[in-house]
Every structure is written in C-alpha cells, then in structure tokens.
C-alpha cells in the first residue's frame, strides 16, 4: 500500500512517529539516544543535529541523516530501553526482572494491584501496561520527594495515568484497598507488610516481593510461613547473558546482567488450621 502524501493526515498510523512520543536513535556503533519528539525541537549529539520535524510523521524503523552526514536508525524504545535510559531517582528494577515480575505475579488485564514503593516508576509503568485500561494500580511511596520524577517517568510512556493512584505513606501501616488481586513489594523490609497484604488480598491472590539479598528473602519467607495465610512460597532469580552472533564469531557477550535481585511469590489462602494442613518451613 502506498504511503499517504501527508503523513500527518493519518495520526492513527502506528508505523509513523508522532509528536510527543519517545523515539530511540541508534548509530552504527549501536549507541542509543532517546528523545521525546516535539515540533520545532532538535536532536543534538557529537554526530550532529537532526530536526525532530524531519522525523515526526515519518516511518518508525526509518533511517535519518544528521547535518554532519551520520545515519541513525529511528525506532520506538521498548520498556526495557526506556528503563535503562530514563532519569533515575531510587534504583530501578532491570528489564529482565520487570518481565518476570509481571509473569510470576500473573498480572492480568483488569487486575487491581497494590505496589510499594513507587521509586523511579519503572515497575509502576510495567504494571500499568499489564493491567490495561480496565485495571487499577495503587502505589504506596514513603518518600514524597521521589513522586514528581517518578510520575514524569511513568507519563513519558503512559500519558494517561488515570488508572494509577499514589499514596504517600508506609504500606506497613496498612492497605486501604480491599479485594486486591496482587500485592507487589519492592521494599527493604517487606515482612512488615505481610499482615497488611494478607488483609487486602483476595484468597487466591498473589504477593510478590523483589529483594537484593538472600537474608532478606529468608526473613520474608519465615514471616509468610508463620502468618499462616500464605502458601506456595517460592523464590527465584534470573541471570541474563547476551550473545554476539556474526558470520565469523558466535560467542557469549563479555558482560552479562547477572544477579540483580530475588523474586519471592506466595499465594493468599485460607489458614491451614481450617484445612487440616500445615506447610513446612
């Protein structure tokens, strides 16, 4: 099908860049440059200048030339790209862990999710995308100072954040929401929130915690078992190794994203005394 004469006349064409969206430019050495496209703005680097107007309305996956003759590939960044390049506040969760969190917690369209804390907004963004327009994400953040930057990061990917509600406070003091499908904890002491999570979750709901050290995981697991309202307590980590594949060489990359954190999940259930069953610790 031929391209329309005026790309701007078809604003819903997802194959073309639009003003206000993120673009990722890649040079011949694989270096990446992230931009928010805006009419009248320019991209500047050591490779030269590229007007955003030369990109807006043009194909995603197209090749764009700076005023110094350098050619750049223009694509939309993935969520993983954005997380790697976005402005940082607190430590962000790696893309490899974001994907596993969404999968292992079984975040589904329409889910009601409570998370803590908001941090830099990377996990919040992944959760919002997973729950979709019919879902809800309620985020608890103890440090009010990080909220503006986190919200800016989220809105760079999801401009409409009407499904998100942020509460400044300690989730360990309680969760206001009820009938929650999932509770996601990115906290140094998640065991303090186990009781609140148990009260908020529906039976069959899932609690997931992301922790950097195994001693923290042990403390959480012991608390979950002692609580009696959780079963199927499981912990895993993900190691990601890239590969370089060319005609003359196939080898693993020199660097890999090894340990970044442990993911612990547990299912909210009825207390075992009602079922005549006591899980081991």
Image (cartoon, helix red, strand yellow):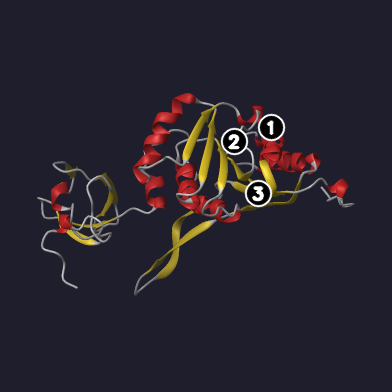
* Res 192 label: 1
Q: Nearer the viewer, residue 112 or 58?
A: 112
Q: Nearer the viewer, residue 29 or 34?
A: 34
Question: Which residue is disc 2 drawn over?
Answer: 187
Above or below, 247 against 216 in this view is: below
- Residue 22 drawn at (x, y percent): 29, 48
Above or below, 258 against 211 in this view is: below
Query: Element type at marker 2?
Result: loop
The mark lying in front, picked from 3 and 2, is 3
Residue farthest right in this picture: 276
- Residue 196 drawn at (x, y percent): 68, 34
* Res 25 label: none
Question: Which residue is disc 3 drawn over?
Answer: 206
- Residue 47 drawn at (x, y percent): 17, 49
Name the residue located 41 percent from the left edge and 46 percent from the top edge. 83
Name the residue located 41 percent from the left edge and 35 percent from the top edge. 151
Q: Is residue 219 left or right of residue 27?
A: right
Name the residue located 65 percent from the left edge and 36 percent from the top edge. 190
């Amino acid at each position: 099908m031929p391209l329309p004469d005026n790309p701007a006349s078809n604003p819903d064409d997802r194959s073309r860049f639009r003003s206000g969206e993120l673009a990722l430019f890649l040079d011949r050495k694989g270096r990446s440059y992230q931009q928010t496209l805006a009419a009248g703005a320019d991209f500047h680097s050591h490779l030269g200048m590229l007007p955003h107007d030369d990109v807006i309305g043009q194909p995603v996956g197209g090749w764009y030339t700076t005023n110094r003759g350098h050619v750049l590939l223009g694509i939309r960044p993935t969520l993983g790209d954005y997380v790697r390049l976005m402005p940082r506040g607190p430590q962000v969760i790696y893309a490899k862990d974001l994907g596993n969190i969404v999968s292992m917690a079984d975040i589904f369209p329409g889910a009601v999710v409570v998370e803590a804390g908001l941090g830099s907004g990377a996990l919040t963004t992944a959760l919002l995308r997973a729950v979709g327009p019919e879902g809800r994400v309620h985020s608890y953040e103890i440090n009010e100072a990080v909220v503006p930057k986190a919200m800016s990061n989220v809105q760079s990917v999801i401009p409409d954040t009407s499904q998100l509600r942020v509460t400044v406070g300690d989730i360990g003091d309680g969760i206001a929401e009820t009938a929650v499908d999932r509770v996601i904890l990115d906290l140094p002491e998640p065991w303090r929130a186990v009781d609140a999570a148990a009260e908020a979750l529906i039976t069959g709901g899932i609690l997931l915690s992301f922790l950097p050290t195994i001693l923290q995981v042990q403390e959480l697991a012991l608390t979950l078992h002692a609580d009696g309202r959780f079963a199927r307590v499981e912990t895993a980590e993900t190691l990601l190794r890239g590969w370089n594949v060319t005609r003359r060489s196939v080898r693993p990359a020199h660097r890999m994203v090894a340990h970044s954190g442990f993911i612990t999940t547990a299912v909210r259930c009825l207390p075992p005394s009602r079922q005549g069953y006591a899980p081991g610790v």
